[in-house]
Image: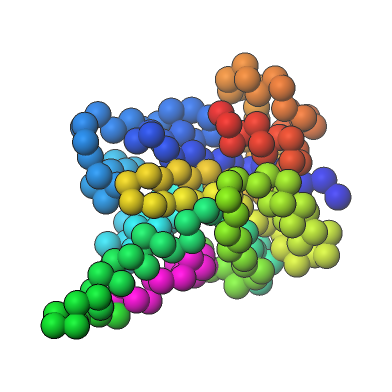
Amino acid sequence: MKTFVQHFVHIHAQKVFIDGVLRYEETATALDFAAFIRNVYKYFEMQYPKFYKMDDLSKLAFVGAELLNVKESTLYKSEDKGIVLMNRSSSLYTDALHQASIADKSDYFPSPAVFVYTLPNIAIGELCIRHQISGENYFFVQSKFNAAMLTNYVALLFRQRHVQQCICGWVELNSNNFELFLYTVEQKSENAVKSAHKSPIFASLSLEGNHILNDTDNIEKLYKL
């Protein structure tokens, strides 16, 4: 079964790329992640008040998913849409914040607002709420981006007809070190990004009618763009 990459987003090194094109670059120096992600949120004029209540991992995932332009997802029923994500640090950054709030018994003040985010799949939950996704969803912890595992697992979901659209990728945050690579996969190629109009580096990808096939080699190359 052939599936296609619809759109893809990179956020790293204080830059935002959408479908391989640089769309935002932070010019301020020594800016921490919290300030950077707020600036991206405002620059792209996103409107979702709950964003400010999320932990930083969820904010990163949320912004990336917004930039995927998944409004095409209205073509599918909620139960036919899925998410498969992975990272290296799980929810360690938020875990550390929670631990700091309970470490001192003389100043013991755990925050329920922090504790609720001490699992990485809560980031998936935020995306499910935002984009009305009730299908398959998984969050894997890997030592590095694993294109083969991700591609094979998503392909299995499509073959077994568990999903018709899937948000996939890598969402890593540890202190101020962060990296996001998200992409959407569908069987339909009509809405897929056309590589012919993008960077010459796309010439190395496996294509069908100028559309990017969702396979391990292509996903590895897109990740490295």
User: Residue 40: image x %, image y %?
Assistant: 32, 43
Residue lying furthest top:
200
- Is 165 on the left or on the right of 97, as rendered? right
Residue lying furthest left:
106
User: Residue 161: image x %, image y %?
Assistant: 80, 64
The segment highlighted magenta reads 113-129
- Is 1 on the left or on the right of 48, as rendered? right
User: Residue 64: image x %, image y %?
Assistant: 45, 48
Number of callouts in the render?
A: 0
- Is 73 on the left or on the right of 30, as rendered? right
Q: Could you say which is closer to the camera, residue 183 or residue 211?
A: 183
Residue at image point 34% right, 35% down: 14
Whether residue 145 appears in magenta in the rendering, the answer is no
User: Residue 150: image x %, image y %?
Assistant: 69, 52
Taking the image as drawn, is residue 37 in sight?
no
Residue at image point 80% right, 59% down: 156
Position above or below: 27 against 111: above
